[in-house]
């Protein structure tokens, strides 16, 4: 019904317009063409002046009315250290262009009014005027010179790279340190990659790109082991950030509008941007608090106001395809303490998705990070056992000491945990141990007894070979006589196949 009414209204408007045209034509015949032309010229001239006033007033009003929504005005000051320079350049440019805009618009409409067609008036032609040529050439040239020189100065300041000698770290705390994050755009998302504790991003190879390795990280490069890929850009406030910008397929654009950061992501040509965020997300929200435009309920969260739900964002400012809108990423600027807490929750892509799979070229070796973590865990267990008065707490299982199937030959990765025990024995010279071997009930009791004794002796021999006095060690095999779980399941049997050490004295 509504559509029908709209159509009928349009038809009526068309009929009225046609009838007005006919009436105007008839009036022209009655009054005479010259008189009608004069009336029309006067009317158009007057209307143009009215339009000019309304248009210019509208420009001023709209700028004032929407200033709280525009970057660089109202509450939307730059949230980065360099942003103020760019905003100043924009304001200067706007000042001069606004002057030209208002002058040209006023002259345009005024001339249309003053020099409207009148009977008996002849046009005056001015083919050349040196004075005018100099005026409208020199003045713009001088203004443009200042703008260009100022722009180049701003460019050199804003686009400066990290100073030579600065150190790349995961958690910068001074001007001599910086955090480098890689942002790779592809249809249709941003992949964000942070360095791990080493502060260095590992190498990439586009030929290694897979579904589990979207940037083509080379897992033989040690620097890649601790790199992690969060779904949002989280950065510490008041620290130098270097964004390494890449594209995997088509042209994208890395845009952080509130920080005045904008740089193309070009396939095959890495670019970068260095900036320092100076306002946390919460501080920026407080700037919006009290501004009428942001004191209204958020349509997506009616129980909160717009200023409470504000977030920085990373966008692609290039029309890269129909899924362009989905490249939006959340950006959080947080305090150093909040950033450190967030880092503890992150896990490297290698350790979470690649380690131990067919894509892992290091399946048969132990990583430095694993060696370090295992050592910390082992030392903690020993310290806890030494501090306990309970006998059961003095018995510790080797978690990573293993043997070749059916034999007493230590595997090549077993020595790491045994070396940890050697260090503990050297640290506590009065500590003595019993090394015990255990098996499940697979096979005969006699064979299991012999195997457990041999395995306990293998550990004993390793410790002695590494400088531990034989007087501090005892090797015992218990066979299948002391199970810790049921032998009816594979999981239970696996627990029963174990090598332990018991702290006898400390």
Image: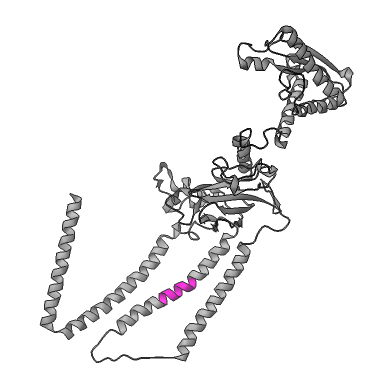
For the magenta stretch, what is the residue range? 95-103
What residue is at 74 percent from the left and 19 percent from the top? 396
Q: How is the image coloured?
A: one colour
452 up-or-down from 54: above or below? above
Residue 282 visible? The answer is no
Location of the C terminus by quadrant is top right
What type of secondary structure mainly makes up the magenta span?
helix
Residue 150 falls in image quadrant: bottom right
Q: Position of residue 218 (x, y in %)?
A: 64, 44
Answer whether residue 99 is magenta in the image. Answer: yes
Look at the image and tell me whether residue 396 can be seen.
yes
Left or right for 98, reference 150: left
- Which one is nearer the viewer's eye here, 99 or 412? 412
Locate residue 194, reporting x and y percent: 62, 45
Is residue 25 toward the left or the right of residue 472 in the image? left
Residue at 40% from the left image edge and 46% from the top image edge = 297
- Residue 378 shown in magenta: no
């Amino acid at each position: 019904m509504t559509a029908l009414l709209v159509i009928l209204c349009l038809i009526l408007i068309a009929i009225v317009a046609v009838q007005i045209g006919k009436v105007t034509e008839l009036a022209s015949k009655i009054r005479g063409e010259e008189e009608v032309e004069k009336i029309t010229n006067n009317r158009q001239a007057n209307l143009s002046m009215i339009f000019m006033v309304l248009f210019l007033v509208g420009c001023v009003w709209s700028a004032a009315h929407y200033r709280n929504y525009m970057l660089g005005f109202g509450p939307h000051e730059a949230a980065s250290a360099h942003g103020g320079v760019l905003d100043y350049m924009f304001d200067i440019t706007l000042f001069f262009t606004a002057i030209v805009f208002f002058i040209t618009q006023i002259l345009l409409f005024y001339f249309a009014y003053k020099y409207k067609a009148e009977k008996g008036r002849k046009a005056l032609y001015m083919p050349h005027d040196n004075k005018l040529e100099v005026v409208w050439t020199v003045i713009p040239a001088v203004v443009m010179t200042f703008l260009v020189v100022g722009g180049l100065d701003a460019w050199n300041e804003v686009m400066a790279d990290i100073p030579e000698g600065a150190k790349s770290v995961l958690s910068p705390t001074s001007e001599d340190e910086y955090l480098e994050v890689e942002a790779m755009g592809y249809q249709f998302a941003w992949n964000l990659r942070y360095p791990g504790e080493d502060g260095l991003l590992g190498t990439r190879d586009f030929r290694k790109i897979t579904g589990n390795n979207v940037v083509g990280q080379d897992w033989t490069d040690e620097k890649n082991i601790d790199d992690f890929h969060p779904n949002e850009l989280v950065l510490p406030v008041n620290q130098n950030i270097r964004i390494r910008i890449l594209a995997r397929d088509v042209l994208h654009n890395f845009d952080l509008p509130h920080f005045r950061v904008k740089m193309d992501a070009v396939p095959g040509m890495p670019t970068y941007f260095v900036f320092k965020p100076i306002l946390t997300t919460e501080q920026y929200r407080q700037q919006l608090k009290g501004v009428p435009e942001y004191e209204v309920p958020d349509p997506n969260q009616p129980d909160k106001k717009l200023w409470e739900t504000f977030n920085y964002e990373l966008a692609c400012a290039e029309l890269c395809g129909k899924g362009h809108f989905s490249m939006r990423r959340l950006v959080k600027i947080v305090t150093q303490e909040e950033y450190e807490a967030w880092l503890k929750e992150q896990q490297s892509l290698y350790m979470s998705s690649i380690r131990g799979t067919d894509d892992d070229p290091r399946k048969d070796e132990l990583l430095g990070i694993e060696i370090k973590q295992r050592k910390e865990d082992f030392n903690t267990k020993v310290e806890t056992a030494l501090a306990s008065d309970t006998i059961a707490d003095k018995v510790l299982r080797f978690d990573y000491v293993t043997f070749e199937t059916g034999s007493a030959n230590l595997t090549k990765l077993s020595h790491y945990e045994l070396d940890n025990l050697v260090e503990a024995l050297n640290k506590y010279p009065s500590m003595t141990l019993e090394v015990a071997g255990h098996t499940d009930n697979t096979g005969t009791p006699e064979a299991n007894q012999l195997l457990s004794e041999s395995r306990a002796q293998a550990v004993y021999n390793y410790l002695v070979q590494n400088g531990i006095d034989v007087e501090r060690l005892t090797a015992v095999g218990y066979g299948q006589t002391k199970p810790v779980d049921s032998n009816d399941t594979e999981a239970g049997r696996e627990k029963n196949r174990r090598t332990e050490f018991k702290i006898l004295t400390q």
